[in-house]
Amino acid sequence: MEKEKDMDVYEIDVMVADESHEKYVDTILETIEAAAKVRGTGIAKRSHEYIAQKMREGKVIIALAGDEFAGFSYIESWGNKQYVATSGLIVAGKFRNRGLAKRIKYAAFQLARLRWPKAKLFSLTSGSAVMKMNTELGYFPVTFADLTDDEAFWRGCNGCVNHDVLTRTQRRYCICTAMLFDPEDERCLLLEKLCGTFVQKEARKKKPGELETAPA
């Protein structure tokens, strides 16, 4: 049997989700949970309604290969919109190792920067690939004390298998690494600009109308 031809990463649409994409929510949650089990790491569990609401609010980036789910990330604001987190980055198994995670990450970053240009963007992750992408975008490692103190955010960690580490250390550290993009830090802005230049070059390969060019 002839091997199925791999879909080029730029044939996959990366877009801001809306209510019409709610049909993918259960698949998204299952994909995130399955990936966490494979990695042996924890996740902040989210409900169907939580993700669906983020879609209705225009806070979700979704990647689709035709009608098939390919990837996802979402953003949320905390602390009276002084902090913004990009979370839940996931790529479905058959679409991994093609650079799709980076496209989704950059699109989520751009959306967050456009909606909350003065907010500090932060990320909690245990994945080296996400750390690398964060660094390219201008994030720097920080202590947990530098993140939002909004209790609503930290309650999201309750479903993680490593939550006991967080509580035992009085929320000073955990398995995840904290990273922060501060729009008032010149180092962050410089890296953001360099990343934007790179993404603009890559964007020549993408389909017209896709959101994934990082702001300069």
Image: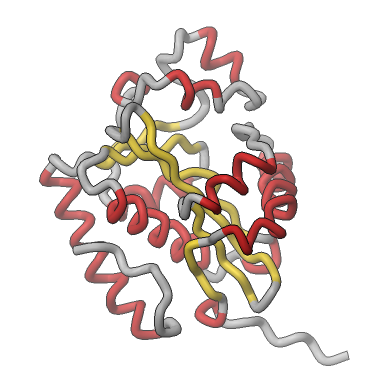
Coordinates of residue 43 in the picture (x, y in percent): 62, 34
One can see residue 203 in this view: yes
Residue sitting at x 26%, y 49%? 138
Occupied quadrant, residue 20: bottom right
Coordinates of residue 22 in the picture (x, y in percent): 66, 56
Residue sitting at x 47%, y 61%? 104
Q: Left or right: where does residue 113 sit relative to residue 85?
A: left
What is the quadrant of the C terminus in the image? bottom left
Vertical placement of residue 216 versus 7, above or below = above
Q: Residue furthest left?
A: 186
One can see residue 129 in this view: no
Q: How is the image coloured?
A: secondary structure
35 or 17, which lies in front?
17
Vertical placement of residue 97 versus 179, above or below = below
Vertical placement of residue 86 versus 152, above or below = below
164 or 76, which lies in front?
76
